[in-house]
Image (cartoon, helix red, strand yellow):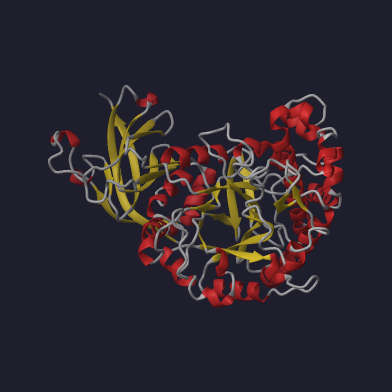
Amino acid sequence: MTQSRRNAGSKLALVALSLISPLALLASGAAGAKTPVKASTATSPIPHLVQTDGKYALIVDGAPFLVLGGQANNSSNYPGALSKVWPAIKDMHANTLTMPVSWEQVEPVEGKFDFSFVDTLVKEARENKVRLVILWFGTWKNTGPSYTPSWVKLDNKRFPRLTNKDGTTSYALSPLYDTTREADKRAYVELVKHIKAIDGDRHTVIMLQPENEVGVYRTARDYSPKADALMAQPVPQALLTRYKKSPGNWNQVFGKDADEYFHAWSIARYVDDIVAAGDAVYPLPTYVNAALKDPLNPDQTPGSYASGGPVYSVMDVWKVAAPHIEILAPDLYSPGSQSYEATLSQYARADNPLYVAESGNKPIYARYLFSVLGRQGVGFDPFGFDYTGYANYPLGAKVFDADAVKPFATLYKLFGGMDREWAKLSYESQVWGVSEPDDHSAQSLDLGKAWSAKVTYRQWQFGLPEWDPENKNGYPDGSDVPSGGVAVAKLSDNEFLVTGLNARITFDTGEANKARGFVLDRVEQGHFEAGKWVMEYVWNGDQTDYGLNFTGAPVVLKVRLGTYEK
């Protein structure tokens, strides 16, 4: 297991960079060198990310960890609401709770900090045996300053907002002012200091999200005189190198994309400077989430989506401008399989671990866990999981109650029994996963040169569809709504860990074994105990003659494949 992207020498250099104003960096291009993922030390093995050959793992307490998360509603971040959060997280079988901590909450009076909620949250998380991801709602929350303290959001002279192209004032704060950034940074660093003080030896908190859905709607960037002057300066060399461009100002280099690229650079430098200061205290892994641009419509106009945020069209800008931020993570609220899968592909990159920071809580979203894991995702974190009575319909379920939790709970219970094992296989071996498409169409898995597989849906546990060509018996109850999926992990050349939901997987030979006959050598149903496989019983005969069929009560199988001479 090799650790990438951060070492002691680079850490010192990055801390030094954090002391430079983002305005100076815009002009000088000092930012942008690729840097290591945050490292732990032998004496303080804090959670951290590792990377080898484009594969990532989140290491918690010295071993790979799969985040099976549930994010509480925005206003559940007070002690009085927690009693309605923990039951939902327990019913979900989540191993992680994601919870906001807001700037207005911890610094209502400038310079006076109150972390009593953080203390309560960490204490109760330990009692409920779950980890925490803390969201910092600072300068940006859904692109706006609603979670900043009153002394920030009401003082537009000290903390200026953007200027729209028509000269009017935007609702969003500008990323170009040191006063705002320094105030936000001070509060964030105090939060990180407090987390280290109360949790540095326990690792209840495993990740941080600095800011939330950064960017701006209804305009592409800040059009203030200060912004225009910076736009006229040379594009930083690091960005020119990344995009293989010749020197020039922003308009000369990026043309029609200049406004959005400039705004993305400005925000990314702002957030990175804040994170760098926190890292100097306690370098937990960090991610920034994206309010998405339509993955199927690349010609959208900046401002019709959150311009400047880490949408797929400016991920390279963010990667150069924000070296301290390990993950750019999508917020996925488009239930259609074509759109959802396209976004997963855009964010699962060799330089970016896949982590679904938010997803809808309608039952139809649960199936996408298979696709996330198949792309070596380090975590899945659907939104709105508490019993406070709030429902974000139509993005989420009409009524969020225990019934709404069940589709997620089924899968979390399944993978929760092998979360460490799956995370290790995902990092050290090979994994595949597919979710049922909206049209229920079959999918193929290329399992290497030796083996292949086909996944189909709306099948009965026994027999073949052609036995009932007119479909007189119909489909399994409830299968009209896509809910299925399959996940496969390689254990050895001929052996695989396989699981699924409402799906059939049929294995066959690959190109290397094309001339040989296929045999399903052995299929064990079982589970993991203390990291060891425990066989419960063997499938054969009717249970294997027509593929391996997973129902709504998923199981875990260890499958050994073989061949014979024809």
Question: Which quadrant of the view contains residue 139?
Answer: bottom right
Query: Is residue 323 at least partly visible in the picture?
Result: no
Residue drawn where x is 28% and y is 31% of the image: 518
Point out residue 208 in the picture as x, y percentages from the top left corner. Answer: 65, 58
Residue 418 in the image, given as x and y percentages of width and height: 44, 56
Q: Quadrant of the C terminus?
A: top left
- Residue 475 vs residue 531, the one in the foreground: 475
Taking the image as shown, residue 516 lies to the left or right of residue 283, namely left
Residue 47 visible in the picture? yes
Q: Is residue 208 left or right of residue 394?
A: right
Q: Quadrant of residue 230?
A: top right
- The percent coordinates of residue 513 (x first, y second) are 35, 26
In the image shown, does 377 or 2 lie closer to the viewer? 377
Give left or right: position of 454 versus 308. Answer: left
Name the residue rendered at 38%, 54% in the picture: 363
**Quick check: 17 above or below 203?**
above
- Rendering coords of residue 22 (x, y %): 82, 47
Judge left or right: residue 119 versus residue 508: right
